[in-house]
């Protein structure tokens, strides 16, 4: 699985300290790191039998989901607001997302951030922040 020369990830480095006075968006490394983390998260969901069915769509739909995921997280974490939060609940309502699925997604996102060298304290704070939208994602669950 891990053949080859690291394909562009060479610029990533461990953050030695975490500045809690900065936004979560800044603490996770800004725009490029968020975009990469969402890409890694999405690719991991397609390999994970627990959540794959939510994300395995046609190519155009998958690109749109990734883009919205990035836009949503940007605003949630204190970066540019690119997503209308009013859409969150209605867009997930019919999907029957359970707490179990939500937790799998949090775990996969934490793994992506860890691989990118995001500080563990920042990852904990990102998980706590993301946890606040749990009800909006799982409300339609029957």
Image (cartoon, rainbow, N blue to C red):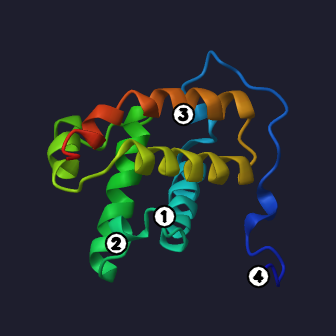
Q: How far separated are the C-alphas under marks 2 and 3? A: 23 Å
Residue 47 can be seen, yes or no = yes
Mark 2 or mark 3: name the one nearer the start of the chain: 2
Above or below: residue 125 compared with residue 83? above
Label 2's element? helix
Residues at discs 1 and 2 in contact (Cβ within 8 Å): yes
Mark 4 or mark 3: name the one nearer the start of the chain: 4
Label 1's element? helix
Mark 2 or mark 4: name the one nearer the start of the chain: 4
- Residue 56 sits in quarter: bottom left
- Which residue is under mark 1? 42
Which quarter of the image is occupied by the N terminus?
bottom right
- Which residue is under mark 2? 62
Name the outermost residue toward the front: 142
- Which residue is under mark 4? 1
Residue 77 can be seen, yes or no = no
Q: Position of residue 125 (x, y in %)?
A: 58, 26
Residue drawn at (64%, 54%) of the image: 112
Residues at discs 1 and 3 in contact (Cβ within 8 Å): no
Q: How far separated are the C-alphas under marks 4 and 3? A: 28 Å
Q: Point out which mark residue 127 bears.
A: 3
């Amino acid at each position: 699985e891990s053949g080859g020369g690291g394909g562009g990830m060479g610029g990533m480095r461990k953050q030695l300290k975490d500045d809690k006075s900065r936004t979560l968006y800044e603490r996770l490394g800004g725009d490029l790191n968020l975009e990469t983390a969402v890409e890694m998260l999405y690719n991991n969901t397609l390999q994970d039998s627990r959540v794959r069915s939510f994300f395995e769509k046609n190519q155009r739909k998958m690109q749109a989901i990734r883009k919205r995921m990035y836009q949503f997280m940007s605003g949630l974490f204190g970066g540019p607001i690119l997503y209308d939060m009013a859409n969150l609940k209605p867009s997930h309502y019919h999907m029957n997302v359970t707490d179990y699925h939500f937790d799998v997604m949090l775990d996969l996102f934490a793994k992506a951030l860890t691989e990118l060298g995001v500080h563990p304290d920042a990852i904990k704070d990102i998980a706590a922040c993301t946890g606040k939208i749990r009800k909006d994602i799982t409300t339609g669950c029957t």
